[in-house]
Image (cartoon, helix red, strand yellow):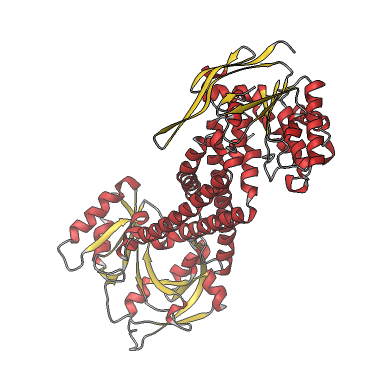
Amino acid sequence: MTETLIKVENVNKTYQRGGETLTVLDGLNLDVPNQDFLALMGPSGSGKSTLLNLMGGLDTPTSGGIGINGVQLDQMNAKQLSSWRSSNVGFIFQFYNLLPVLTADKNVELPLLLTNLSKSQRRDHVLTAMKAVGIDDRSDHKPNELSGGQQQRVAIARALVSDPDILVCDEPTGDLDRNTATEILELLKILNEDHGKTIIMVTHDPVAAESAKRVLHLDKGKLTD
Amino acid sequence: MYWTLIKAGVLRKKVRSVLTVLSISIAFLLFGLLQAASPIFTGQMDGLRADLVMTMSRFSMVGKIPYSHVEFIKEIEEVESVLYMDYITSVSQDSMLDGITVAMGGDIEIYERFKISNEDLKAFKTLKIGALVGEAFAIEKDISIGDRVFVKSLSMNADGTYDWEFEVVGLYNSSPKADEMGIVVNYDYFEDSRISDKGTVAVIISKVSNPEFADVISQKIDNEFTNSSWATRSGPESQLAASIMADFGDIELIINAILSAVFFTILLVTGNTISQSVRERTTDLAVLKTLGYQDNQIFIMVLLESLFLILLGVFTGLGMSLLSIPAINAASGGLMEGLFFLTTEKLLLACFIGVLVSFVSSIMPAYKALNLKVVDALRSD
């Protein structure tokens, strides 16, 4: 676990709000080793989701550099970032964000529609991902026919289906009861330990953070420990 | 890829999508029916010929011109043969609306729209009180060959009455079928027997050797009589009918104005539907972008979604039109045949309008989707 996968170097992120400059990340440095399971904690507005977005290639820093696996995300344009995201990072959200009219397997298939895989190849990948998260028996159910935990499993399968190295999780258990949250965290641990996925998770929940290998705290755009 | 996304967008609010498609299809049903009926209002009917020059009174559709005009036209070098006719004004059977009786003379054969068997034509020419009855009219009035028909006319007969009697010697067919609602009698007999309007005709039809001469010959005829009290209005059959209909007003313009209002409404309806759909799916679109879908793919997806909804409406509407047309024709007893139809050009025009409406109504929502910032849409921290 010594090889650095993500290198955040002196990153600043500022926003202009009503003529005022708002600093969200302030000269932040961070190394994330390969196969790490990192929990980011901090109060609301501390910049943890912004950092998550930057590491997930959803946004670019105002200054500083973000390198992932030798690729400088801060040098990429929007189109290049889209392509990079589609094969290198999987996203898991607090509210699952599944498309409501698509069945579970169709939701999982969404990232693969951007690839050149044949229909049968896509079906195989979807089945593998759904089996990995234990939701393959619900493949033809729509999101509103699934419990919160099941929906989050589908979302995790969708994040996994293109076999990315990094999973970016924004409050993945924030909408779940304790037991279901524990199941989801166990699943993330398995993905980290058995499947070698590097996981970066933003959470407010100290119990959820205990599942991670490392916990970092942010406050006012800086790492506090 | 796009199909899955379009389906997801369209099915998200099924009732709204169905209502949108329904409103579009009703608009295009209206388009189809109005366009199908437009030949009736514009005179642009199928089968009208460019090598037949029609001449009539400049001042009235049912006005008279002297028979001497026929002689003048016959003498024009490029004119091959001439047919002339006069209206006996009304048909006797039950009321004036039953049909129309026309007295024809000259080379009846050139008016090929009327299909008459050689045998019937021969009988017609042989018997001076002979009459040819349109098949549709004969069926409706149960008239058979050998029957006598009585016509009440505004032209007084030599016996001092307005009653005319003819003997049916044959039937004729025509396209459009509506022209079968009539009776054709011999002009010479009618002319010999009437005591008013003698030596006049209502319409002269001349067949020219080359359609390219039709305009010049029309001009020549009109110029000849331009300063007389029997001034004429001539033109190729294919143009004159449209020109006469234009005298009643630009009905095509009125039709187009109605359709424009309908399509503008559809534009607003579809634009609103797509805008609403994009607004409601901000998170979905942001998630797709998160998964790696590019901005331009999302842009195209919104455009295609609108195109799908509109084309579904267009095809449903035109389909209903195409099904209605034979039904309406059948309900009219076939009388609308050749008058009420949709051409391939009109169908393609409908598709083009559909594509245009789709593009205009979805370009702004698509542009908004294109510029959607993922981090703003998903912001939770």
Foreground of the two, A125 or A37: A37
Instruction: Say above or below: B228 vs B101.
Output: above
Q: Examine the image and state in which quarter residue B230 appears.
A: bottom left
Foreground of the two, B144 or B264: B264
Q: Picture coordinates of residue B211 (x, y %)?
A: 35, 47
* Residue B135 shows in this picture: yes
Instruction: Say above or below: A181 vs B124.
Output: above
Quadrant containing the C terminus of chain A in the rendered view: top right
Q: Is residue A17 left or right of residue B26?
A: left
Instruction: Say above or below: A100 vs B143.
Output: above
Instruction: Say above or below: B347 vs A30.
Output: below
Q: Residue furthest bottom?
A: B160
* Residue B293 shows in this picture: no
Q: Is residue A107 left or right of residue B173?
A: right
Q: Residue at x 85, y 39 (%)?
A: A137
Q: Residue furthest front?
A: A224
Q: Picture coordinates of residue A5 (x, y %)?
A: 67, 15
Q: Is residue A141 left or right of residue B120?
A: right
Q: Residue furthest left?
A: B227
Quadrant containing the N terminus of chain A in the rendered view: top right
Report the number of discs: 0
Q: Picture coordinates of residue B263 (x, y %)?
A: 45, 54
Foreground of the two, A218 or A134: A218
Q: Residue at x 77, y 36 (%)?
A: A153
Q: Picture coordinates of residue A193 (x, y %)?
A: 81, 21
